[in-house]
Amino acid sequence: MSGMRILVVEDEEPIRQFLTLALKRSGYEVIAASDGDEGLMRATGEMPDLILLDLMLPRLDGWEVCRRLKSSHTTSSIPVIMLTARSDERDVVEGLSIGADDYVRKPFLLKELLARVEARLRHSRSDVGGMMFEHHNLRLDCEHGMVWIDGEELILSPTEFRVLELLARSPGVPLHRERLLNRLWGLDGGDSRTLDTHISRLRKKLSAHPNAPAIEALRGRGYRLVWGEKA
């Protein structure tokens, strides 16, 4: 995806330089920041297509950077992939709960990281099936990642939007977890806990609207979108 711009926010210089070189060799434009304050400033000022965000940063940690980016209408649609060396699962869940789209644990395989970057960029630019999609009272603008229910906008993260779009394009038809994982991250055998977190957040947002469809879990068959009942 030549010409796409990626922001690398990483305080460890060897890792930052390694990522910068690897991404440039893959055809991306790269901007870099060494702490959270600089990362937030460069994200809002230069509007990259994707952000690789380390969690343990000086001045402003990665969680707070992500929280501020996702709470701003200007930057909320920028995909964020967290980089973490921490083993505590709660740290990852917290990052996903505030809007991060994916995470990669250190040390990571460069091939895997590049595949996740490409998948996130591809999905954020997805135009499969047309730019606008409507079913019942649900309307999706797939170019801008916007959703309306009965004309009222529902604010979703890019990954939440993608999950809803995939389910909405096959209403009432179960989609297996493996298919969702592959369509979302482009990797066989992706982390199902990440998918569970995004679906949980999406369910909560949908349940706040009285006429929204519900995501129903079917044991051994995956998930489907249904109207007229709450799963």
Image (cartoon, rainbow, N blue to C red):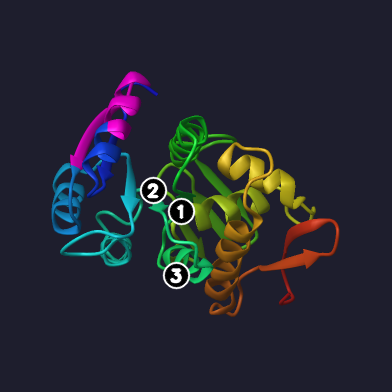
- Regarding residue 150, the answer to whether it shows in the image is no
Q: Residue 121's spot in the image, x, y percent?
A: 43, 36
Residue 79 numbered mark, or none = 2
- Residue range of the region highlighted in magenta in the rendering: 18-32
Query: Which numbered disc flags the more N-terminal residue, 2 or 1?
Result: 2
Q: Tell me the residue at 24%/33% (across/down).
A: 17
Amino acid under disc 2: Pro
The residue identified by callout 1 is 101
Indicate which label's residue lies in the foreground, 3 or 1.
3
* Number of numbered discs visible in the structure rendering: 3
* Dot 2 and dot 1 residues touching (CB under 8 Å): yes
Q: Residue 14's spot in the image, x, y percent?
A: 26, 37
Secondary structure state at the residue bearing disc 3:
helix
The residue identified by callout 3 is 94
Q: Residue 79's spot in the image, x, y percent?
A: 39, 48
| Nearer to the camera, 143 or 217 | 217
Q: Tell me the residue at 62%/52% (across/down).
A: 191
Amino acid under disc 1: Asp
Quarter the N terminus occupies: top left
Which of the 4 image quadrants contains residue 217? Answer: bottom right
Amino acid under disc 3: Glu
Q: Is residue 57 left or right of residue 38?
A: right
Give the Cα separation between the discs numbered 3 and 1: 12 Å
